[in-house]
Image: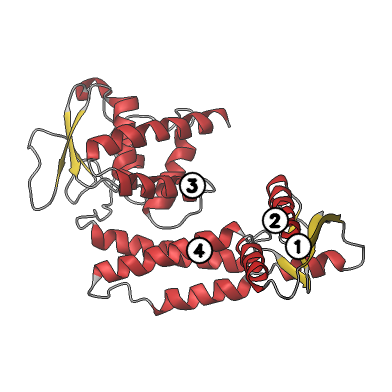
Amino acid sequence: MPTDSTEETLYLALVLSLPSRNATERMRAWRTLKTWGCAVLRDGVYLLPFGEVHQQRLTDLGAEIREAGGQAEVLRVLPQPHGQEKGFRALFDRSVEYATLLAELDRLDPIFPDVNHLKKAVRGLRRRFDELTAIDFFPGPARVTTQRRLAELESVLDARLSPGEPNARPGKIERLDRREFQGRLWSTRSDLWVDRLASAWLILRFIDPAAHFVWFAPPEAPPPEAPRLDFEGARFSHVGTRITFETLMASFALEETPGLRPLAHMIHALDIGEPTSQEAPGFLALLRGMKSRLHDDDALLDYGGRILDDYHLFFSES
């Protein structure tokens, strides 16, 4: 897909005409082109950045238009020098749509008493943001600002939906011997989210391969003999700027393990609500999908752990 590069971009143009009497087909074609993010060059001429998917879509739509009695041609267009490329890109500017989303985000009160209403509203804005980014072929600062604001609101909402999130404590992290933590029962809060899911995966893969987990819901108390993860007063939790995943890495001398540092960066970015990792939005989308489908924490760890295996392999080979 095109980026913010100033180099000239090849475009595709769909030039079409439909009989005036065929209003239904005209409206259907217009809605389809709008959904794909086409820019209007002039009446009956629509632009998209060049790409195989775009070319196939426009070709198929052109065939349908001709079957309906109209005319349609798909052309490749190379902008002329001296400003035409800049003019073409301006047709795809999404800043107004981002401004609309940002205004709606700013109107949402993160401490609104009805948390379910807030959750529904945030989910709707996330869906609209994802739809908009899918047709934002030349992203700019408006996209970054909106994404950051949405992530901040989602982070606040996640904290409200998952009470018991730990506060960071000061101090040094004790270096521990993995041999003393084998075959243990570990405990953390139920309804796994980013840091707890990743921490449980880290334990199974690098610390205690025979680990078992108990998921508890406060005010329930975890078993006293179980090492505790990611809640207030837990042995392994947030320390300074480190999230629980990073605390475990430091505790068991895993910080130089290939692939774990960039993975920790991704988990940290998601846990604190600042998607500074390029890979973070993709994992967040996968996790939200898993959470909507899987309602058992053991199943979530099993499925999510395999995805984290793939992320770790990717980071190890990068």
Q: In which quarter of the image is residue 21?
A: bottom right
Q: Mark 1 points at which residue?
A: 69
Q: In which quarter of the image is residue 140?
A: bottom right
Assign a secondary structure to mark 3. Answer: helix
Does label 1 or label 4 sit earlier along the sequence?
Answer: 1
Does label 2 or label 3 sit earlier along the sequence?
Answer: 2
Nearer the observer, 216 or 116? 116
Q: Which of marks 4 and 3 is in front?
A: 4
Is the residue under label 3 in contact with that under label 2 (CB below 8 Å)?
no
- Report the disc number at residue 64: 2
Please rate how many residues cluster around mark 4, counting C-alpha atoms within 10 Å: few if below 14, some from 14 to 19, many from 20.
some
Q: Nearer the viewer, mark 2 or mark 3?
A: 2
**Quadrant placement of the C terminus:** top right
Please rate how many residues cluster around mark 3, counting C-alpha atoms within 10 Å: few if below 14, some from 14 to 19, many from 20.
few
Does label 4 or label 2 sit earlier along the sequence?
Answer: 2
Q: Which of marks 4 and 2 is in front?
A: 2
Type of amino acid under label 3 = Gly
Distance from the alpha carbon under mark 4 to that under mark 2: 30 Å
Q: Mark 3 points at which residue?
A: 282
Residue at (25% x, 56% y) in the render: 167
